[in-house]
Image (cartoon, helix red, strand yellow):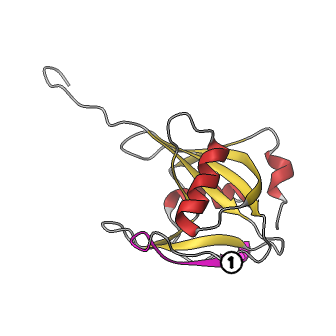
Amino acid sequence: MTGTFMKRREPVVGVGAILVRSDGAVLIGHRIKRGETASWCLPGGHVEAGEAFETAAVREIAEESGIREVTGARVFAVALHTDADRTQVTAGVVARPADVGAVAATPEPEVFDRWVWARPEELPVPLFPASAALLAAWQAKPVPDGWTVYATADAMALLGEGQ
Protein backbone atom coordinates (compact mmCIF):
# COMPACT_ATOMS: atom_id res chain seq x y z
CA MET A 1 0.00 0.00 0.00
CA THR A 2 1.48 3.30 -1.03
CA GLY A 3 2.07 5.74 1.82
CA THR A 4 0.58 3.40 4.42
CA PHE A 5 2.58 1.29 6.84
CA MET A 6 1.15 -2.19 7.16
CA LYS A 7 2.26 -4.14 10.20
CA ARG A 8 3.05 -7.74 9.43
CA ARG A 9 1.64 -10.35 11.75
CA GLU A 10 4.22 -12.65 13.25
CA PRO A 11 4.26 -16.19 11.88
CA VAL A 12 2.96 -18.99 14.06
CA VAL A 13 5.02 -22.16 14.43
CA GLY A 14 3.20 -24.95 16.18
CA VAL A 15 3.11 -28.65 16.77
CA GLY A 16 0.34 -31.22 16.92
CA ALA A 17 0.91 -34.60 18.57
CA ILE A 18 -0.76 -37.82 17.55
CA LEU A 19 -0.41 -39.93 20.66
CA VAL A 20 -1.19 -43.52 19.67
CA ARG A 21 -2.01 -46.31 22.12
CA SER A 22 -1.04 -49.91 21.38
CA ASP A 23 -4.66 -50.63 20.32
CA GLY A 24 -4.46 -47.88 17.68
CA ALA A 25 -6.61 -45.32 19.50
CA VAL A 26 -5.43 -41.70 19.46
CA LEU A 27 -5.75 -39.07 22.17
CA ILE A 28 -8.02 -36.16 21.26
CA GLY A 29 -9.35 -33.38 23.47
CA HIS A 30 -12.52 -31.31 23.46
CA ARG A 31 -11.17 -27.76 23.07
CA ILE A 32 -13.33 -25.07 24.68
CA LYS A 33 -10.93 -22.12 24.58
CA ARG A 34 -12.69 -18.79 25.09
CA GLY A 35 -13.28 -16.88 21.86
CA GLU A 36 -13.12 -20.02 19.71
CA THR A 37 -15.72 -22.42 18.43
CA ALA A 38 -15.58 -25.66 20.43
CA SER A 39 -13.77 -28.41 18.53
CA TRP A 40 -11.77 -31.61 18.96
CA CYS A 41 -8.03 -31.13 18.99
CA LEU A 42 -4.78 -33.04 19.22
CA PRO A 43 -2.43 -32.08 22.05
CA GLY A 44 -0.23 -29.30 20.75
CA GLY A 45 0.61 -25.65 20.69
CA HIS A 46 3.37 -23.17 19.99
CA VAL A 47 6.97 -24.23 19.60
CA GLU A 48 9.16 -22.32 22.07
CA ALA A 49 12.45 -20.72 21.02
CA GLY A 50 15.20 -23.32 20.89
CA GLU A 51 12.79 -26.29 20.95
CA ALA A 52 12.75 -29.14 18.46
CA PHE A 53 9.31 -30.18 17.21
CA GLU A 54 9.54 -33.48 19.10
CA THR A 55 10.45 -31.73 22.36
CA ALA A 56 7.58 -29.27 21.92
CA ALA A 57 5.16 -32.14 21.30
CA VAL A 58 6.19 -34.02 24.43
CA ARG A 59 5.94 -30.80 26.49
CA GLU A 60 2.49 -29.96 25.10
CA ILE A 61 1.19 -33.49 25.72
CA ALA A 62 2.27 -33.17 29.37
CA GLU A 63 0.92 -29.63 29.82
CA GLU A 64 -2.44 -30.29 28.22
CA SER A 65 -3.22 -33.90 29.15
CA GLY A 66 -0.98 -34.63 32.14
CA ILE A 67 0.57 -37.61 30.33
CA ARG A 68 4.26 -37.09 31.07
CA GLU A 69 5.95 -40.14 29.64
CA VAL A 70 5.86 -40.81 25.91
CA THR A 71 8.16 -42.74 23.62
CA GLY A 72 9.24 -42.64 20.00
CA ALA A 73 8.28 -39.03 19.26
CA ARG A 74 9.02 -38.40 15.57
CA VAL A 75 7.98 -35.78 13.04
CA PHE A 76 5.91 -37.29 10.22
CA ALA A 77 4.79 -34.13 8.39
CA VAL A 78 4.77 -30.35 8.33
CA ALA A 79 1.49 -28.60 7.51
CA LEU A 80 1.28 -25.09 6.07
CA HIS A 81 -2.00 -23.21 6.39
CA THR A 82 -2.15 -21.55 2.99
CA ASP A 83 -5.55 -19.93 3.47
CA ALA A 84 -4.68 -17.78 6.50
CA ASP A 85 -4.05 -14.13 7.27
CA ARG A 86 -0.53 -14.99 8.46
CA THR A 87 1.97 -17.77 8.01
CA GLN A 88 1.00 -20.77 10.12
CA VAL A 89 3.24 -23.85 10.15
CA THR A 90 2.40 -26.90 12.26
CA ALA A 91 4.60 -29.96 12.56
CA GLY A 92 2.91 -33.30 13.10
CA VAL A 93 4.60 -35.57 15.62
CA VAL A 94 3.56 -39.16 16.28
CA ALA A 95 4.39 -40.80 19.63
CA ARG A 96 3.22 -43.51 21.99
CA PRO A 97 2.38 -43.29 25.70
CA ALA A 98 5.01 -45.12 27.79
CA ASP A 99 2.20 -46.54 29.94
CA VAL A 100 -0.34 -48.51 27.90
CA GLY A 101 -2.96 -47.61 30.50
CA ALA A 102 -2.24 -43.86 30.41
CA VAL A 103 -5.21 -41.76 31.47
CA ALA A 104 -5.44 -38.13 30.42
CA ALA A 105 -6.34 -35.41 32.92
CA THR A 106 -7.48 -31.81 32.33
CA PRO A 107 -4.73 -29.62 33.85
CA GLU A 108 -5.93 -26.73 31.64
CA PRO A 109 -9.72 -26.84 32.13
CA GLU A 110 -10.12 -23.43 30.50
CA VAL A 111 -8.79 -24.94 27.25
CA PHE A 112 -9.89 -28.61 27.34
CA ASP A 113 -12.86 -30.00 29.25
CA ARG A 114 -12.10 -33.65 28.46
CA TRP A 115 -9.81 -36.05 26.64
CA VAL A 116 -10.84 -39.28 24.94
CA TRP A 117 -9.06 -42.13 23.21
CA ALA A 118 -10.70 -42.55 19.80
CA ARG A 119 -10.20 -44.95 16.93
CA PRO A 120 -8.82 -43.04 13.93
CA GLU A 121 -11.84 -44.01 11.83
CA GLU A 122 -14.25 -42.79 14.56
CA LEU A 123 -12.88 -39.36 15.45
CA PRO A 124 -15.32 -36.87 16.94
CA VAL A 125 -16.16 -33.70 15.01
CA PRO A 126 -15.71 -30.87 14.40
CA LEU A 127 -11.93 -31.11 14.36
CA PHE A 128 -9.64 -28.15 15.09
CA PRO A 129 -8.31 -27.14 11.63
CA ALA A 130 -4.62 -27.95 12.20
CA SER A 131 -5.58 -31.26 13.84
CA ALA A 132 -7.78 -32.13 10.85
CA ALA A 133 -4.88 -31.49 8.46
CA LEU A 134 -2.39 -33.54 10.47
CA LEU A 135 -4.78 -36.44 11.08
CA ALA A 136 -5.63 -36.58 7.36
CA ALA A 137 -1.94 -36.64 6.46
CA TRP A 138 -1.24 -39.34 9.07
CA GLN A 139 -4.08 -41.47 7.70
CA ALA A 140 -2.93 -40.87 4.08
CA LYS A 141 -6.21 -39.10 3.27
CA PRO A 142 -6.72 -35.82 1.39
CA VAL A 143 -6.00 -32.80 3.58
CA PRO A 144 -8.64 -30.09 4.05
CA ASP A 145 -8.76 -27.18 1.63
CA GLY A 146 -6.43 -24.36 2.63
CA TRP A 147 -3.67 -26.70 3.88
CA THR A 148 -0.54 -28.04 2.22
CA VAL A 149 1.23 -30.93 3.92
CA TYR A 150 4.84 -31.95 3.40
CA ALA A 151 5.61 -35.50 4.52
CA THR A 152 8.98 -36.29 6.06
CA ALA A 153 11.32 -38.80 4.42
CA ASP A 154 10.26 -41.61 6.78
CA ALA A 155 6.58 -40.65 6.82
CA MET A 156 5.52 -43.72 4.85
CA ALA A 157 6.85 -45.97 7.62
CA LEU A 158 5.04 -43.89 10.24
CA LEU A 159 1.69 -43.83 8.44
CA GLY A 160 0.94 -47.41 9.36
CA GLU A 161 1.75 -47.05 13.07
CA GLY A 162 -1.27 -47.65 15.26
CA GLN A 163 -3.71 -48.12 12.41
State whether residue 89 is above or below residue 120: above
Marks counted in the figure total 1
**Residue numbers of the magenta segment:** 109-122
Question: Residue 162, percent across and down?
Answer: 82, 66
- The residue located at (32%, 68%) in the rendering is 34
Residue on which disc 1 sits: 118
The residue type indicated by label 1 comes to Ala
Q: Is residue 43 magenta?
A: no
Question: Quadrant location of the N terminus?
Answer: top left
Q: Residue furthest left?
A: 3
Q: Secondary structure at mark 1?
A: strand
Residue 127 pos. (x, y %) = 53, 69
- Along the viewing direction, whichever of 14 and 109 lies nearer the viewer: 109
Front one among 142 and 133: 133
Residue 108 appears in the rendering: yes
The percent position of residue 12, horizontal first and vertical second, equals 44, 42
Can see residue 132?
A: no
- Residue found at x 74% / y 40%: 152
Where does the C terminus fall, quadrant-wise?
bottom right
Q: Count neighbours of disc 1 (C-alpha within 10 A) and say few if under 14, some if 14 to 19, many if 20 or more.
A: some
Q: Residue at x 57, y 76 (%)?
A: 105
- Is residue 120 rendered magenta in the image? yes
Question: Along the line of sight, which residue is nearer the eye, 78 or 16?
Answer: 16
Q: In the figure, 8 relative to 136: above or below?
A: above
Q: Residue 122 location in percent, x, y?
A: 68, 79
Q: In the visual, does 63 lie left or right of 159?
A: left
Q: Is residue 54 left or right of residue 82?
A: right
In the image as oriented, which residue stretches furthest toward the top?
3
What residue lies at 62% left-to-right and 52% top-to-bottom? Answer: 57
